[in-house]
Image (spheres, rainbow, N blue to C red):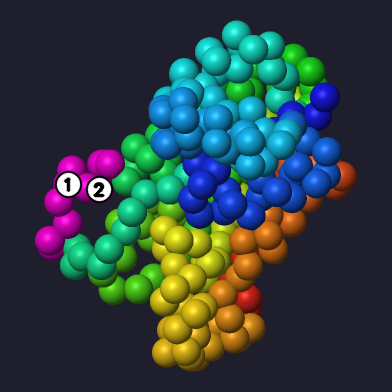
Amino acid sequence: MTAALVTNVTRYAGPGVVPVLLRQGYTVVCHDRSFADPTERTRYEAELAGTTCLAAQTPDEIAREMEAQEIVLDAAVSNDVHPISPVPVENVALGDLRATFEAVVVFPFRLAQLLLPAMKARGAGSLVFVTSARPLSPEPGFAVPTSVRAAATAFAQALAREAAPFGIQVNAVCPNYLQSEMYYPRAHFVDDPKGRAEIARLVPSGRLGEPEEVGELIAFLASGRSRFTTGQAVHFTGGWP
């Protein structure tokens, strides 16, 4: 069995990467905030055959639940999410900064700590961190997500140096202008002509990235087909900025 863990499967890159991994023959082990509800786990597994939904919410709970089910991972996609809204630096509540850091840096850091020993023992594995391309062109009002996402990308690259001698690949995929209901909802930026025109002015490709387009990129990096590719931050931006 080829197994890959994907976090936050219903948000950000999750809706794109899970179907691609399933088509490529993976059993996809799924984490999501909504899966604290057993009804949501059952519904998701019924809709996407080949998925295994975890009730676990924290990295430690994820590791324990996978161990109890004797799941051995070939790859993990840390698809980290947190709500954003424009706030000038002087008005940022430190509690919001800490919450963003916890979700976007501490969560994947701890998850990596827990997954690495088994991958090192096997001498193989792939970790893909979904971060953001925001640091390429910081926007006023978005200092928190820009700086925290940069930290997550830097962590992935630092981890890659430590993990490479053990045969483990670590890469970051850094999207911007990816169609996702959390950040760029379809109703406004795809279905609405004004929203489409706004995106066309900003993105050289003239549109938002499709979920399964980023899914294909993530699946390739997770696959181990190019094992020498590690420590990379791959921007998924349609030519922006």
> Pointer 1: what residue?
94
User: Is 181 on the left or on the right of 26, as rendered?
Assistant: left
Instruction: Inspect the image, locate mark 2, and give the three-letter code of the amino acid beneath it.
Output: Leu
Marks 2 and 1: in contact by CB < 8 Å?
yes
Give the vertical position of 104 relative to 58 (above or below).
below
User: Is 173 on the left or on the right of 103, as rendered?
Assistant: right
User: Is 54 on the left or on the right of 81, as rendered?
Assistant: right
User: Who's the residue at 69% across and 18% down the image?
Assistant: 71
In the rendered image, residue 5, in percent from the top left (x then y), is placed at 63, 33
> Pointer 2: what residue?
97
Counting labels gives 2
Q: Main secondary structure of the magenta part?
A: helix
Q: Nearer the viewer, residue 173 or 199?
A: 199
Q: Is residue 34 visible?
A: yes
Q: Nearer the viewer, residue 60 or 212?
A: 212
**Secondary-structure class at tag 1:** helix
User: Is 217 on the left or on the right of 151, as rendered?
Assistant: right
Q: Nearer the viewer, residue 231 or 186?
A: 186
In the rendered image, residue 208, in percent from the top left (x then y), is placed at 56, 75
User: Who's the residue at 39% across and 71% down the image?
Assistant: 138
Instruction: Inspect the image, locate mark 1, and give the three-letter code of the amino acid beneath it.
Output: Leu
User: Who's the residue at 22% across and 47% down the image?
Assistant: 96
Is the N terminus in the top left, top right, bottom left or bottom right quadrant?
top right
* Residue, far right: 225
Q: Which region shows up in magenta?
A: 90-99
Q: Nearer the viewer, residue 55 or 73?
A: 55
